[in-house]
Image (cartoon, rainbow, N blue to C red):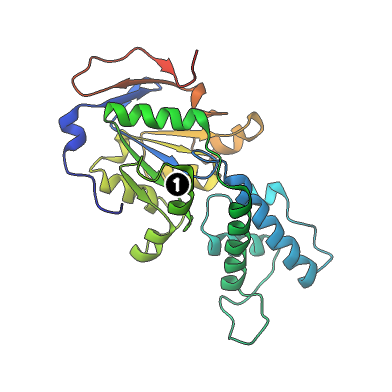
């Protein structure tokens, strides 16, 4: 999956997708909260982790909230999420702890969060977000390049459970980030690696993201269109971080998909009439 897409394939095919008045060669999808509903599982795992930690560390601290999740954790890799939240509460802890000690280090908290997430994943499974999967499949059929980008090390497992592991031209995830030394969101490195693998300039790529850190990463990377997925109440925050368009779901965006050798398509929505 980490191999680059064959050079020139997109340019040879002529497949394009139009949105917001422009044509693009490729689309990058964030995973959690865009393709699958696993963002809710991540949020619950983070809350269980930090509420337990705060109760033992300093019971006077307020519990972990949805706002904490969106501001400090959403879209980031586990270790960065731990560091960001603890910093927001002015809590200092070691990066690692020696075996046999009970120090709640960054690495131990990150590992605990992963275990909590897998417990929820095993118990509840993965649900996909239908309009996104519909768009993904239509892009693939037309020959438009598609990539999945996620800070999570569990991206492959989630996609496999959702039956979508083979539906992307390339995937860049937390395992790649560690192996290649790629900085996490809001740094654009993960998105830029996906663009490199697709042999496509970022300005010719749409990025669809629901996390503020991911929106900021796509904006910083110079991507052609950044679509933020969020409620009306989150629109300002996503726009402030760089979203060009903010919608509740991809079916609220008009997409015109042109396959190889086809004339430009009329604009249509991803939802079924």
| Residue 245 visible (yes or no) | no
- Look at mark 1 in the image and give the residue it sits on: 159
Q: Is residue 64 left or right of residue 116?
A: right
Number of numbered discs present?
1
Q: Is residue 103 left or right of residue 30?
A: right
Residue 86 lies, in percent from the top left, at 66, 64
The residue located at (36%, 39%) in the rendering is: 167
Q: Is residue 84 above or below residue 10?
A: below
Q: Is residue 195 left or right of residue 54?
A: left
Q: Is residue 206 left or right of residue 263?
A: right
The picture quadrant where one finds residue 141 is: top left
The residue located at (24%, 27%) in the rendering is: 15
The picture quadrant where one finds residue 104 is: bottom right
| Residue 9 visible (yes or no) | yes
Residue 222 lies, in percent from the top left, at 36, 41
Residue 91 lies, in percent from the top left, at 69, 69
The residue located at (44%, 48%) in the rendering is: 160
Classify mark 1: residues with Cα within 10 Å, few (<14), some (14-19) or many (20+).
many
Nearer-the-camera pick, 5 or 243: 5
Residue 138 lies, in percent from the top left, at 36, 26
Nearer-the-camera pick, 89 or 105: 105
Q: Secondary structure at mark 1?
A: helix
The residue located at (26%, 40%) in the rendering is: 201
The picture quadrant where one finds residue 232 is: top right
């Amino acid at each position: 999956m980490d191999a680059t897409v064959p050079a020139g394939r997109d340019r040879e095919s002529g497949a394009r997708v139009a949105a917001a008045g422009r044509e693009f060669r490729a689309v990058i999808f964030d995973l959690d909260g865009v393709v699958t509903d696993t963002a809710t599982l991540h949020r619950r795992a983070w809350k269980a982790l930090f509420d337990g930690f705060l109760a033992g560390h300093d019971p006077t601290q307020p519990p972990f909230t949805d706002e904490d999740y969106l501001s400090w954790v959403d879209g980031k890799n586990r270790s960065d999420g731990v560091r960001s939240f603890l910093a927001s509460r002015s809590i200092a802890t070691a990066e690692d702890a020696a075996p046999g000690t009970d120090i709640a280090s960054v690495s131990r908290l990150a590992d605990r969060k992963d275990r909590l997430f897998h417990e929820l994943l095993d118990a509840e499974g993965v649900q996909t977000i239908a309009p996104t999967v519909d768009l993904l499949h239509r892009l693939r059929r037309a020959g438009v390049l598609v990539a999945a980008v996620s800070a999570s090390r569990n991206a492959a497992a989630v996609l496999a459970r959702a039956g979508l592991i083979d539906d992307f031209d390339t995937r860049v995830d937390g395992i790649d980030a560690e192996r290649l030394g790629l900085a996490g969101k809001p740094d654009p490195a993960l998105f830029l690696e996906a663009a490199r693998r697709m042999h496509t300039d970022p300005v010719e790529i749409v990025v669809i993201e629901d996390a503020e850190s991911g929106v900021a990463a796509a904006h910083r990377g110079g991507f052609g269109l950044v679509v933020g997925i969020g409620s009306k109440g989150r629109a300002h925050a996503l726009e402030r971080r760089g979203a060009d368009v903010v919608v509740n779901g991809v079916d609220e965006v008009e997409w015109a998909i042109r396959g190889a050798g086809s004339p430009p398509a009329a604009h249509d929505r991803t939802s079924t009439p």
